[in-house]
Image (spheres, coloured by chain):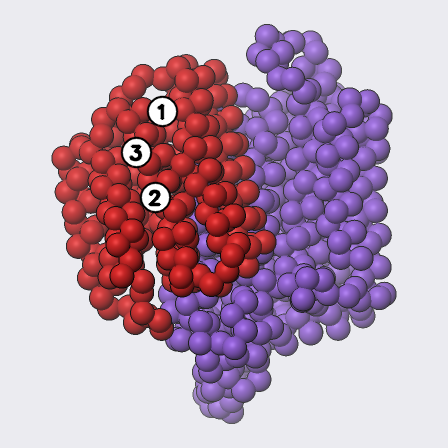
């Protein structure tokens, strides 16, 4: 019934797995841009369930920010910081992909146990939203570079957004726009911070930021 | 009225950023908080009308936190004036090439962010809609991050980065909590996430989704509030930020995250999940007090010590709410007292840092001899924060301890008092060693300007006043706010133990609450 939705969810799943397995920062940013497009389009794909004409406006705003603006900010930060292209994970790419597989199984199991008040628009919706959140947290903690942490934050944020669109369809527009503005500001401020980190330390390895401790 | 109180600091912040004139920026930096204080005091005289179909509405809990925030900002902004001057002189003397990269002087960014932070905090206190509340809390993180980076060195940058990432990820989880709450409420007639609607709709909320939402809210906003084990960013950020900013972070930003948690507790309590939420708060509260106790002992850095003390006091707030009943009243009172006392201490710590240029408490001796007024403010702040009798913290800690007795929880009471005592010893050994003794290397007196200590002393006087007598308008307000957390029917249903008449455990069996014992030391 929602073929487009299933395709978008598949794209989201594949891009997250791609980010887990990719060794190049630039590739990861491209993948997050593609994922941003897919996530941003979700409201349009279930437009028959949304029941509001503002959906289009909202979808345009989220595609523009998640698919274009945030990745551009990340690319700019990477360019300014002039960092090496390697992602430098703590956990190897193979192991990261194994984590991805495990997280997918776990999300599928968890979502089979959560009773939904309304039927989901797609059977894959809940598992993939949860999977995206888990992947985001994993990327945030398992990569050395400051940019990768922002990448993880965006993944997590995409997951939360996907959950919101698919299961909570009556959020007022003011709140959604506020959320989007906040995330934009967060990515922007983080980008500026990355620039300062690279200038101050000549690297953006978050694991070497360790002068403050007890 | 409500719009004015949010927009006043925001507009002032934008003006301070746009116009380059230094006198204007300074005037705005002090004028806006003073105007804000006047407005928030006025709300006690005439309660403002709700806006946006009740999404923005000042209730009694919000009013308390609004007033505290205002008071703290006035003190902090006054302190900032002197600080900016010395910082400017310092910066000019070492004029590095790096600073030229910035189009605006850091001072403009600082003033703008401080005022925008005030605006965001105000929005948190008046939000009744969970979605908007999330937006406001995240905005406080973003507005305060550049403030922490004001020194522009490696250490403050590291602190800023940790603060940004940890808090943003934490608050993203709270957004998921928002959506879970919306799923739980999807059977409701009015699907908007307004606190009062959700409280009124108690049976319609789905308990399993509500529980999940509660956990995500506590993890998300708890990160912002600095509850252990989610506090990792706090000691770094609070110790690296300029003193006035640390005072605001500890006194106002943490409180506002606490208010966000209170809102979720309100909904949980009404839905009959009060007991579950309270247990959660108790566990996190003791984790925080325990963590703080471990790290305050033998803490070499006095600003970090103050930061861990904030973790401890956030733990006390959580425990107060976790006990419930008069404990909730105690927690709200404690939030105010802690803000005043901690603001005073951080401002004093800033002065000490400016004089000695070190954060290591072991290098500082004989403060009382070299600069008696600062020495006394430092000791006074310590007494205020650790609950020595005439100060307000004593009253609120006593209220929480008494609530533990009344609800027959001896383990809670003993642990609470024990941890208070440990933190007291840890702070005392450091603070008193700094104040007393003799500085052998440089024994001469410091001629400081007493004016620069006025904000700290004013906060200290308020902390003292809160201990001597709580003003009647605050008293009624506190009671109303505490009552909001105790929806009559469901609270009794979930906690039958409170109704059982005293059996074996009578009040006299309990040890004397330690604040008194502490005072005797």
Q: Helix or strand or loop: what does disc 1 sit on?
A: loop
Give the residue displayed 36% in from the left and 53% down from the top: A45
Mark 3 to mark 2 CA distance (whole Å): 11 Å
Q: From the viewer's perspective, is B461 left or right of B354? A: right
Chain B: drawing colour: purple
Write down the residue under mark 1.
Answer: A205
- Residue B405 - label: none
Q: Earlier in the sequence, mark 2 or mark 1?
A: 2
Counting other residues with Cα less than 10 Å from the Cα at mark 1, is it few (<14), some (14-19), or many (20 or more)? some
Give the residue displayed 83% in from the left and 39% down from the top: B31
Kindly indicate the quadrant of the structure image that contains residue A108.
bottom left
Write down the residue under mark 3.
Answer: A31
Give the residue displayed 62% in from the left and 11% down from the top: B100
Is residue B199 shown to the viewer in this render? Answer: yes
Asked whether the residues under marks 2 and 1 belong to the same chain, the reply is: yes
Q: Which chain is red?
A: A
Residue placed most toward the observer, B169 or A71 = A71
């Amino acid at each position: 019934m929602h073929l487009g939705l299933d395709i978008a969810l598949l794209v989201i799943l594949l891009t997250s797995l791609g980010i887990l397995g990719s060794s190049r920062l630039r590739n990861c940013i491209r993948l997050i841009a593609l994922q941003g497009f897919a996530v941003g389009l979700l409201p349009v794909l279930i437009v028959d369930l949304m029941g509001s004409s503002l959906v289009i406006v909202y979808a345009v705003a989220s595609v523009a920010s998640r698919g274009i603006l945030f990745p551009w900010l990340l690319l700019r930060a990477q360019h300014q910081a002039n960092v090496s292209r390697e992602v430098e994970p703590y956990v190897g790419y193979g192991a990261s992909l194994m984590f991805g597989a495990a997280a997918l199984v776990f999300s599928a199991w968890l979502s089979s146990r959560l009773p939904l008040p309304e039927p989901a628009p797609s059977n894959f919706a809940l598992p993939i939203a949860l999977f995206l959140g888990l992947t985001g947290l994993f990327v945030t903690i398992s990569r050395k570079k400051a940019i990768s942490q922002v990448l993880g934050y965006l993944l997590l944020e995409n997951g939360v957004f996907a959950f919101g669109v698919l299961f909570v369809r009556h959020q007022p527009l003011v709140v959604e726009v506020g959320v989007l503005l906040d995330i934009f500001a967060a990515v922007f401020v983080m980008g500026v911070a990355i620039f300062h980190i690279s200038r101050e330390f000549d690297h953006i390895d978050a694991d070497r930021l360790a002068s403050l401790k007890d | 009225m409500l719009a004015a109180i949010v927009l006043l600091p925001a507009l002032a912040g934008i003006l301070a950023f746009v116009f380059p004139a230094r006198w204007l920026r300074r005037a705005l930096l002090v004028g806006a908080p003073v105007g804000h204080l006047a407005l928030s005091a006025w709300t006690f005289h005439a309660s403002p009308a709700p806006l946006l179909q009740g999404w923005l509405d000042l209730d009694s809990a919000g009013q308390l936190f609004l007033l505290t925030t205002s008071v703290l900002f006035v003190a902090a902004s006054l302190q900032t004036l002197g600080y900016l001057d010395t910082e400017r002189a310092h910066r000019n003397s070492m004029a590095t090439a790096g600073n030229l990269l910035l189009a605006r002087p850091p001072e403009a960014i600082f003033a703008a962010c401080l005022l925008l932070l005030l605006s965001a905090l105000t929005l948190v206190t008046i939000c009744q809609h969970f979605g908007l509340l999330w937006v406001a809390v995240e905005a406080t993180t973003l507005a305060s991050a550049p403030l922490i980076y004001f020194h522009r060195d490696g250490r403050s940058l590291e602190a800023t980065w940790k603060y940004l990432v940890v808090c943003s990820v934490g608050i993203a989880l709270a957004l998921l909590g928002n959506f879970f709450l919306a799923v739980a409420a999807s059977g409701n007639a009015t699907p908007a996430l307004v606190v009062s609607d959700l409280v009124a709709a108690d049976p319609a909320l789905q308990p399993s989704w509500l529980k999940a939402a509660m956990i995500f809210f506590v993890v998300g906003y708890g990160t912002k509030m600095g509850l252990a084990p989610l506090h990792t960013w706090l000691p770094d950020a609070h110790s690296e930020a300029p003193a006035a900013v640390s005072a605001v972070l500890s006194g106002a930003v943490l409180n506002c995250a606490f208010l966000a948690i209170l809102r979720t507790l309100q909904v949980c309590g009404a839905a009959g999940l009060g007991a579950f939420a309270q247990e959660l708060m108790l566990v996190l509260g003791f984790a925080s007090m325990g963590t703080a106790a471990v790290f305050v002992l033998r803490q070499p850095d006095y600003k970090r010590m103050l930061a861990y003390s904030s973790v401890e006091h956030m733990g006390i707030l959580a425990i107060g709410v976790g006990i419930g009943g008069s404990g909730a009243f105690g927690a709200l009172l404690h939030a105010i007292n802690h803000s005043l006392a901690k603001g005073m201490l951080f401002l004093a710590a800033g002065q000490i840092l400016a004089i000695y240029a070190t954060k290591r408490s072991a290098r500082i001796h004989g403060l009382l001899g070299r600069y008696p007024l600062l020495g006394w403010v430092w000791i006074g702040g310590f007494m205020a924060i650790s609950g020595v009798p005439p100060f307000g913290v004593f009253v609120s800690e006593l209220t929480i301890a008494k609530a533990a007795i009344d609800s027959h929880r001896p383990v809670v009471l003993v642990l609470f008092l024990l941890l208070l005592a440990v933190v007291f010893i840890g702070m005392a050994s450091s603070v008193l060693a700094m104040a007393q003794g003799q500085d052998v290397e440089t024994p001469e007196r410091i001629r400081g300007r007493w004016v620069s200590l006025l904000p700290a002393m004013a906060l200290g006087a308020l902390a003292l006043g809160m201990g001597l007598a709580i003003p009647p308008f605050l008293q009624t307000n506190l009671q109303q706010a505490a009552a909001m957390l105790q929806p009559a029917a469901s609270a009794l249903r979930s906690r039958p133990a409170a109704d059982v008449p005293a059996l074996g455990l009578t009040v006299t069996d309990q040890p004397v609450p330690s604040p008194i014992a502490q005072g005797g030391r």
